[in-house]
Image (cartoon, grey):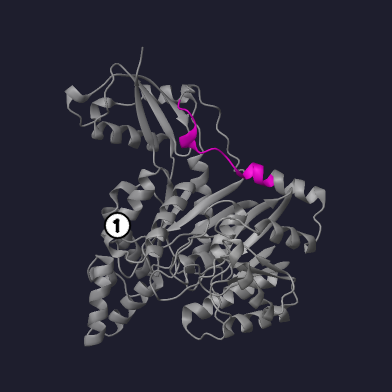
């Protein structure tokens, strides 16, 4: 494993993207864009490499986010087999560079110094000053255009432990098995669906989405069982998408913590705008989305907008109501002392969050019997606000304490199986004959005659209706058919796409 470290804004993420051959990390002129550690795979002369990008390190910094970045970098360096320290050739050697070099020397890891931004041979003289850092392996490079990167990689590979050929082959086999073509990329032409395959192979990619500061990074840490992502009360802490592979009960879950999605007018810095774009991109590359909602705030218009992104892109969805313990605690405080003005304010906020009124809490005197009623009222409110997600399961958790987060895994497994479910054409046509289309509230002029239907692809489940004329289905007609399909075959958590084709 190769770990890239350095001060802010020296070009670490540019080098990281250069090594892995794609734009995985957000790059910009603003310092401190990268915060969490990012992992990527590279290959050089047939050798597979694991590369880690870290946030800009400022030793002995006491502020919350810089200190957390340093802690993330230290975790990465413990795992490292080689460390590349990146410095900016166009800036003078500073005390933080010297302090960071001293810390790296103490680690005992093989060190390499990449003097970045040497874009022309005339600038190579500036690299000489950095010999003062005491790192023998010094390489003038330009991460932007790739100059000197090959020589750096050759030197790094020379000190890495040899990997047995059988281990390489095993890694390649796992990677080839984990990549499966997206259902959207398959041509909708196969009329006879294959039998249903129940087994889940490869990774289940799960994107954690939501607006800023709802607890997405805390949820990732709870699911991964470690401090994988930086958590702070500052909205917008996460910028790059952070992913973590979790193996549970023989299944591989790839959880991807995305940046909080804001409205376009609310993003000012370029890094924030790019993080929102990248969040949408990682959402569309996932199989399932965990939509995280702050229980203490309720469902907002922005929550509905983000849910719409996932729904329209064909991702399966699970609604995660986070900070549920906070809502329960507020309701209990309001019950214990309803006459207190402070508690009265708390009670009003709780009422707004639950949208259920005082009767939801007054229904029972015992705590255990009151909680289900509160949850039921809250779920009803969420369903009313997100009517288009009636197919999505809902889980109530507290990511900070880890309570109920283990319930997410079976839900993800269920939704993943439902997403990949296939129904044969014979089953679909028998189902079609049993539907009473007279119950559909559609104007007679907008109705069509359906001869037969077939499931063309999975992920998401997509059905083709062969009709007597070429016409777009009326919204109510499409919703009626979709509800009938769900009632008969399930497809829990997954949107259903219906397309029409004129039968010849």
- Examine the rendering and report whether any part of residue 175 can be seen: yes
* Nearer to us in this view, 65 or 216: 65
- The residue stretch that appears in magenta: 174-188
* Nearer to us in this view, 73 or 326: 73
Q: Residue at x 28, y 20 (%)?
A: 470
Indicate left or right for 134 with 163 as reference: left
> Residue 201 placed where, x, y %?
62, 43
Indicate left or right for 366 with 159 as reference: left
> Residue 148 placed where, x, y %?
65, 59
Quarter assignment of residue 464: top left
Residue at the far front in the pictured view: 122
For disc 1, the marked residue is 380
* Nearer to us in this view, 261 or 274: 274
Q: Is residue 177 magenta?
A: yes
Q: Residues within 10 Å of mark 1 (few under 14, many from 20)?
A: some
Residue at the far top in the pictured view: 504
Q: Is residue 389 above or below residue 421?
A: below
Q: Is residue 201 above or below residue 331?
A: above
Q: Is residue 4 magenta?
A: no
> Residue 436 placed where, x, y %?
29, 26
Indicate left or right for 112 with 483 as reference: right
């Amino acid at each position: 494993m190769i770990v890239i470290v350095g001060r802010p804004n020296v070009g670490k993420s540019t080098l990281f993207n250069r090594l892995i051959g794609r734009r995985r990390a957000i790059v910009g002129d603003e310092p401190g864009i990268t915060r969490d550690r990012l992992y990527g795979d590279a290959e050089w002369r047939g050798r597979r490499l694991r590369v880690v990008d870290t946030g800009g390190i400022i030793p002995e910094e006491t502020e919350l986010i810089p200190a957390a970045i340093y802690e993330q970098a230290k975790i990465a360096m413990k795992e490292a087999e080689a460390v590349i320290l990146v410095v900016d050739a166009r800036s003078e050697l500073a005390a933080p560079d010297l302090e960071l070099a001293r810390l790296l020397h103490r680690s005992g890891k093989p060190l390499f110094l990449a003097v970045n931004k040497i874009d022309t041979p005339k600038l190579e003289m500036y690299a000489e000053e950095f010999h003062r850092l005491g790192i023998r392996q010094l390489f003038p490079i330009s991460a932007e255009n790739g100059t000197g990167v090959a020589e750096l990689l050759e030197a790094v590979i020379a000190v890495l432990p040899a990997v047995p050929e059988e281990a390489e082959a095993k890694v390649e086999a796992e990677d080839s098995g984990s990549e499966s073509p997206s259902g959207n990329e398959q041509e909708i032409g196969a009329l006879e669906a294959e039998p249903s395959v129940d087994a889940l192979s490869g990774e289940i990619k799960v994107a954690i989405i939501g607006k800023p500061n709802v607890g997405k990074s805390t949820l990732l840490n709870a699911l991964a069982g470690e401090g994988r992502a930086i958590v702070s009360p500052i909205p917008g802490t996460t910028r790059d998408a952070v992913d973590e592979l979790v193996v549970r009960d023989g299944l591989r879950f790839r959880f991807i913590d995305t940046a909080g999605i804001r409205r376009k007018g609310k993003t000012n810095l370029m890094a924030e705008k790019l993080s929102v774009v990248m969040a949408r991109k990682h959402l569309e590359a996932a199989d399932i989305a965990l939509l995280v909602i702050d229980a203490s705030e309720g469902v907002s218009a922005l929550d509905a907008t983000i849910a719409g992104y996932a729904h329209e892109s064909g991702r399966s969805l699970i609604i995660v109501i986070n900070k549920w313990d906070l809502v329960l605690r507020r309701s209990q405080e309001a019950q214990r002392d309803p006459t207190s003005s402070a508690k009265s304010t708390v009670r009003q906020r709780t009422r707004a969050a639950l949208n259920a009124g005082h009767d939801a809490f007054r229904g029972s005197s015992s705590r255990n019997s009151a909680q289900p009623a509160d949850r039921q009222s809250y779920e009803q409110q969420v369903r009313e606000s997100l009517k288009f997600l009636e197919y999505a399961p809902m889980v109530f958790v507290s990511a900070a304490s880890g309570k109920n987060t283990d319930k997410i895994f079976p839900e993800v497994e269920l939704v993943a199986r439902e997403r990949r479910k296939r129904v044969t054409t014979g089953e679909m046509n028998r189902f079609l004959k049993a539907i009473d289309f007279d119950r559909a509230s559609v104007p007679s002029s907008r109705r069509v005659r359906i001869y037969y239907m077939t499931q063309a692809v999975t992920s998401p489940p997509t059905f083709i209706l062969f009709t007597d004329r070429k016409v777009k289905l009326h919204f109510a007609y499409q919703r009626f058919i979709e509800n009938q399909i769900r009632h008969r075959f399930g497809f829990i958590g997954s949107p259903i796409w219906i397309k029409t084709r004129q039968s010849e």
